[in-house]
Image (tube, rainbow, N blue to C red):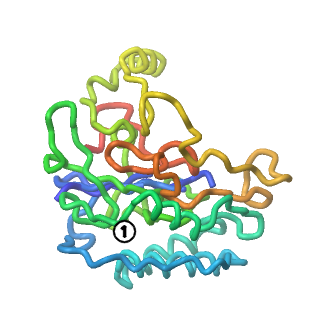
Amino acid sequence: MPALLAAVVSVAANGCRDDDPPTVTGNPTTWKILVWAAGSVPEPGKLAAPLVEQDDGKMPETLKEQRDVLLRRMKGYFGYTDETMSAVRQLFEASPILGQGNPVETKHPMTRAECFRIRKEAGLSHVDDPVCKLRNMVPLYKAKAGEKPEDARVCVDQYEFPNMPCEYPVVHVTTREAALLCKATGKRLCDAHEWEGACAGYLRDPKDEYAFGRSRRDMKSIHNNNREVLWAYGKEKNHALCGTGSTKNKDCHGGGYRKCGSNTYPAGAFPKCVSPLGVFDQHGNAAEHMNYPMKPDQLAS
């Protein structure tokens, strides 16, 4: 089984990993979780259908209520153990702001019910990948080098953390918190090489991406001169396909928790904002945490 990667959203808290193959990758700024950490959670067999809690139209009025609802949905959807949920809850409660945005100020531009409807009309149904064998994770591999999905050593989350379609991303997450949330759910934070591979639809050889040993300025120049310009959804920029239409609160002059709502869309609400590998929302919505390798031994996989 490949390693598990995740991604976490931060703007409004992206990846977790384990070095022993196989590994899995994903999304919790939300980030994307990248890896299955051997021994941290049972290696899954055949998965039961996810328990999806539909939208009742009510929005939590307090941060505690918001967290309680989210953690209840996570447990039901993934079937996490009480031990896992306790570890996740402790991380949430240790922060005064970690959640899905300030409940007083946040005005989401789309409801979960609307997201479910859009995905249904687009023909998007739940399918667990046979390679990754974990909910909402897809294999990351070198497609242009002739590799096939079953050759993947890493899997990545399809959605922003908590990796549930039509759930609002977790935001106001520090890098440390993102890494710990990944670990608590048996994954790891992805690195930039993995995240960009998930976006492009194929992993490149690191030596073609990074001029290690050169100055940061030279690394940037060499990378940009050799890169293929594309977006997750194709070669032509069209961010209207993604969650880019939200707005700031009237009194939000910059950033911050007190006066700025995390006015995010539900994850996966834009069916065409998806990479060839099946990873959603890598443009728009919430920004995502990841590790940045500055030398070869910092590459995660």
The residue tagged with tag 1: helix, strand or loop?
Answer: loop
The quarter of the image holding the C terminus is top left
Q: Is residue 6 visible?
A: no
Residue 166, compared with residue 241, is above or below; it is below
Q: Give the residue at the far bottom of this rendering.
A: 82
- For the point 72% across and 59% down, the residue is 261
Percent x, y for residue 36?
A: 26, 61
Please tell me how crowded label 1 is: few (under 14), some (14-19), or many (20+) other residues with Cα within 10 Å: many
Percent x, y for residue 146?
A: 14, 34
Q: In this view of the protein, which residue sits in the foreground, 174 or 272?
A: 272
Q: Check disc 1 and give the amino acid type.
A: Thr
- For the point 46% across and 22% down, the residue is 216
To which residue does mark 1 refer? Answer: 185
Numbered-mark total: 1
- For the point 55% across and 71% down, the residue is 92
The quarter of the image holding the N terminus is bottom left
From the viewer's perspective, is 164 left or right of 21? right
Residue 35, compared with residue 143, is above or below; it is below
Q: Give the residue at the far right of this rendering.
A: 251
From the viewer's perspective, is 176 left or right of 209? right
Q: Is residue 140 visible?
A: yes
Residue 289, compared with residue 180, is above or below; it is above
Q: In this view of the protein, which residue sits in the foreground, 40 or 146?
A: 146
- For the point 43% across and 28% down, the residue is 235
